Amino acid sequence: MAVLTLAQAITDALDTALDQDDRVLLMGEDVGKTGGVFRVSNGLYEKYGSARIIDAPVAESGIIGTAFGMAVAGMRPVAEIQFMGFSYPAYDQIVSHVGRIRNRSRHRFTAPMVIRMPYGGGIGAAEHHSESTESIYAHTPGVKVVVPSTPYDAKGMLLQAIDDPDPVIFLEPIRLYRSVKEEIPDGPYRVPLGLARVLVPGDDVTIITYGAMTAEGRKAVAILAQEGVSAELIDLRSIVPFDVDTVVESVEKTGRAVVVHEAHRTAGFGAEVVAQIQERALFSLFAPVQRVTGWDMIVPLKLAEHHYVPTADRIVAAVGKTLED
Amino acid sequence: MAVLTLAQAITDALDTALDQDDRVLLMGEDVGKTGGVFRVSNGLYEKYGSARIIDAPVAESGIIGTAFGMAVAGMRPVAEIQFMGFSYPAYDQIVSHVGRIRNRSRHRFTAPMVIRMPYGGGIGAAEHHSESTESIYAHTPGVKVVVPSTPYDAKGMLLQAIDDPDPVIFLEPIRLYRSVKEEIPDGPYRVPLGLARVLVPGDDVTIITYGAMTAEGRKAVAILAQEGVSAELIDLRSIVPFDVDTVVESVEKTGRAVVVHEAHRTAGFGAEVVAQIQERALFSLFAPVQRVTGWDMIVPLKLAEHHYVPTADRIVAAVGKTLED
Amino acid sequence: MLQILTPEGELVGDPPVDIPMTRRLYRAMVAARLYDRKATSIQKQGRLATYAPFEGQEAAQVGSAAVLSPDDWMVATYRDAAAMWMQGYPWELLLAGRTGHERGGSPPDHVNVLPPSITVGAHMLHAVGLAWAERMQGTDRIAITYFGDGATSEGDFHEAMNFAAVFRTGTVFLCQNNHYAISMGIEGQMATETIAQKAGAYGIPGVRVDGNDLFAIYRATSDAVERARRGNGPTLIEAVTYRLGPHTTSDDPTRYRLEEEVEQWRPRDPLERVRRYLETNQAWDEEWQKLIEGEEGAVVERAVQLAESLSAPDVDDLFDSMFAEPTSDLENQRRLLETEGG
Amino acid sequence: MLQILTPEGELVGDPPVDIPMTRRLYRAMVAARLYDRKATSIQKQGRLATYAPFEGQEAAQVGSAAVLSPDDWMVATYRDAAAMWMQGYPWELLLAGRTGHERGGSPPDHVNVLPPSITVGAHMLHAVGLAWAERMQGTDRIAITYFGDGATSEGDFHEAMNFAAVFRTGTVFLCQNNHYAISMGIEGQMATETIAQKAGAYGIPGVRVDGNDLFAIYRATSDAVERARRGNGPTLIEAVTYRLGPHTTSDDPTRYRLEEEVEQWRPRDPLERVRRYLETNQAWDEEWQKLIEGEEGAVVERAVQLAESLSAPDVDDLFDSMFAEPTSDLENQRRLLETEGG
Ligand SMILES: Cc1ncc(C[n+]2csc(CCOP(=O)(O)OP(=O)(O)O)c2C)c(N)n1
Ligand SMILES: Cc1ncc(C[n+]2csc(CCOP(=O)(O)OP(=O)(O)O)c2C)c(N)n1
Ligand SMILES: [Mg+2]
Ligand SMILES: [Mg+2]
């Protein structure tokens, strides 16, 4: 057991997978010699060499398209896209090929691959470096989309994703890379994909979120507790598949819900969560489900970003609204 | 006044705009000599020549990226993507540049351009030719996304879109290209973007849809009428901006709603419609809002497509569910 | 431009194969033409969705595919049925894709041919990854990818060529320059004289061959495959050919090209020159022609029957084909479809 | 490789500009270096977000931008502050982008320079469209685009070159080959000897110049701009140079390159050789150096003050900047933000 940050837990998972399975390889821009722009692949190039830790040309479609070919031919590639905002040149490969091959070949060919992408804002980064567009991938048939929020989950979910017989988009919350630490078992273990987790149990309202926003969720829960409101906090961990049962069970208990994400509001994944809650538990609701989200705008740069990325205060205010009714 | 199909109404709009405004041009694969794969630009090459009706190389990113540059430099390009399923290679240009330039330059540079895309299924087309992924564009800040369902709207909305100072994604329902006809005024007229329209008024339930699905919606309304159910049918016409007021007004009246689209279900635009209905009108609802959608799967080929694309019967069944409560 | 057999059937270089093999390849071209014409004709009867004929391109496809080992990878397009069939993809599955049946994308287990790519350009990268993975796994399998002149304009062509060059993958890029991308003539597609010269932008060999010359295409592909198999990296081959028919059965080529142009290409037919060559070598006569047409025609007929007898995929097939195990989302949707009675 | 002024400051060709002009360009390079060092140093104090230094690339940027007309278009990257400044983009706005202020993307009205592109590759297409539109509108404005060696791997580079070639747009492609794309050395980026040779894949001229030679870069760009302005189409220029600093202030170049390599490039400094040349021609002395450093340094200081004195964008600025008129969606969201007290 070692105390690891979320970034280190991912390094550990990669190391474990590379060590266990010859078919695993890592490919991406700057993942090799320099260990990745976030140092997530630190040390792996030295340990596994340039044939398995592949520094790729600056070409995202090339990275995903060739990784796809490798996966079809029996490898287990882990492709890194340097930032989610640079995944769009590869979008066609993901939608038109990665997510389709099993279906269009009726299981004859498959693409067991992982696409890792650091995502999200809150650190005052440059343009295009704060994207959180997971809902477009959630709307892409044939790929799973998961988002760990703890070091333990990060390692276990990444190992599970690498083992998954289908493509998995693995989103890494930049803001949590180094801000959370915990003890992590050595060696391999798996965290199943597709199951949400109740991070904090509560009775009065359900706060549903994932990724970096779990940190704001925790803060909100603490503030609410001081105000005498008992909030239940759910970390979805996976948006495809979406664990509607865990969410509905909670909302049936609390009768109130707030969904939080930093993605743009319109057609963000929060809308799906709300739609499914009301489909299953409309008559348990005492108040409209609230969404606390980023806005339909380009993520502002450093000086104004705080107007965009949801905060604990905004979550608390939204909870307040659900308590009015 | 002439009786035109939806496809012809678009031709007429293009002709009108090209004639009125020298800055307008049309660019895309096969739009010129052969008049487009759906013959939507029929005759324009002969009339306006190769400098304004531009047959482009097979490169969607190239088409959108150069059209973007043209728009910034003062032209009013209309870029055609041959099928929505081929828009993904241009996705990065749309998300990272077309939708961003006004914001990132604080109005100093703008991209007044239209991106036309035939979309949708129901005609047993080949793979990738039946896509309906409008929600990914709805989740893209800085672009409007509109979908006409009648020849009159098609012409008026396209002329409005070409005039719009911001980029507009203009979706053309393939299935309606030739199946609907109506009298259209000669010369220019405008239909404002962002306003939904009540196609059929009714009292018992609201059916909300857009594009090709309005045809199934109309059929469903007719079947329901025979069963003594008075359904109101709303054509959104625009998903960005989304005319929530018209929708909520109707749902407050009927207390029941069904949202219909052929897009995949998860994170489809229907989820946004449901989320906003419950945000504004939760206590008017007698039953959960139902979604009738395509599934989270690759659109099946001809022989099985009918299991995927929503039908009037599925809409009627969903209305039935809302009436149970 | 490499040419070995002239349109008149005369040798102007060393034939890469002997007479018996030439007869086999000729027979394959005859089969391909029969298939192509059959598919076109049943499409006209409404039995297929749009079909993309390849008449005129038989030599480019048959001659190149002929040099592959049975387990080499192939990644080709909607117009490459002959090449795919050469590599083991059955006619009936190629047809099933066009009747609108998903089974069409699923070749037999030993056939390493991906379903035909409908998107233009993207699939070339897959052939880079496939060849790369084979090297990683220590096999000597190579990957060949077929694409058109239009596809060279897509960014993915560039990325595929560059990755293949940088990582020296065993990939053969076989471009059938049939002079058109739907209505767009090659002169509007690019400003270069040739496609082969684009190889220079990647530091790999590029060769231009008479794509209607079975021998030239065989020779060039066999050199490229050899190079790839030895670990010496990729090659770009430009097979200069011509699509005699429409882009697809929905296309009207008179809108963008003159009949005279088509007529110029007819005498360069890829089958006829081999037939003449064989005849000169006493290896062809009318009787044999009838025999192979009969036999291959029967195979095609059977394929049509097989394709048309497949029963449509049912709902479970649809839901079960997205992932190894359907996700909870899909299971929920399947239940919904049942209750909606869709 | 075109060279006119050697690292020792000796002429080996015809200088494209006279001594007074050389002094002006030298002064511009001095200003650029002062800016670059200032930005780097205030970044270390936490006053800027990450910064991408261009030390070593001053000649490539100043020498090329110097040949443009004031209303020509420029589309460049995060590392091209010197080129953008030459074309009228004020230092303070270039800095404002790095303090995290959106005003940084908004140059004065008469300046036809797009905000610096952070995405690698995509912006080259914009320069094709810009030049094309100018021709449609009957002006003789051209567009120049700056990009790096890494950017040549993106599909959009290919599509931009091809469109420019096919439509003969007045676009100058100026590649600063600084040998690295973050940690990736050029030999891992491509398998070609040069970047200039890639022009051959598009049928356009490609030239390779010593990118640290102000005169060579001036000459090559002025030829290309001339050609573009006359309607004779695009040119690809490879300016061979070297990034002496890190990729950005967050980068640690010792992880991927040897200090010896950097040391080899220091004597090829683009400023020093011009200084020597001027000195030889009695057009440089210490006093003048101090004068221009003082004056240009003061301009940079003022720019820092200006950039830092901008007050942060407020909520209305954010909501009002997405469309000409905010949509109903945005108006609803603005109201929501107010009630949430965000
Ligand atoms: C990404 C993409 N864009 C556009 C299309 C539409 N389309 C189908 S075939 C074709 C032309 C391709 O021409 P070429 O590569 O020369 O192949 P050919 O059809 O001549 O064999 C186009 C544009 C497509 N299928 N995919
Ligand atoms: C589409 C895209 N992919 C990846 C990145 C991350 N990134 C930023 S700079 C860079 C390297 C670019 O190298 P080069 O083109 O040589 O320019 P240089 O930085 O050397 O000036 C990369 C990969 C990006 N900004 N955009
Ligand atoms: Mg072609
Ligand atoms: Mg570089």
Image: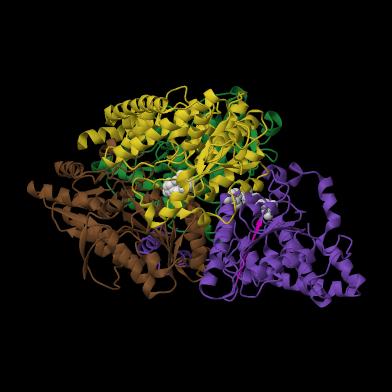
Chain colours: A brown, B green, C purple, D yellow
As rendered, which of B288 and C209 lies closer to the eye?
Answer: C209
Residue C212 shows up from this direction: yes
Position of residue C189 relative to residue B46, above or below, is below
Position of residue D90 relative to residue C241, above or below, is above
Q: Residue at x 67, y 61 (%)?
A: C80
Image position of A18 (left or right of C243): left
Image position of C226 (left or right of D300): right
As rendered, which of A263 and C213 lies closer to the eye?
Answer: C213
Q: Does the magenta stretch include residue D114?
A: no
Task: Please identify the dominant SS of the magenta region.
Answer: strand
As rendered, which of C272 and A41 lies closer to the eye?
Answer: A41
Residue B265 shows up from this direction: no
Image position of A7 (left or right of C79): left
Q: Total marks drawn?
A: 0
Position of residue B151 relative to residue A290, above or below, is above
x, y percentage for residue D226?
63, 29
Using the rendered view, name the quadrant where residue A311 is placed.
top left
x, y percentage for residue C32?
74, 66
Image position of A172 (left or right of B177): left
The N terminus of chain B: image quadrant: top right
x, y percentage for residue B149?
51, 38
As rendered, which of D172 and A205 lies closer to the eye?
Answer: D172
x, y percentage for residue B213?
48, 45
Part of the protein shown in magenta: C142-147
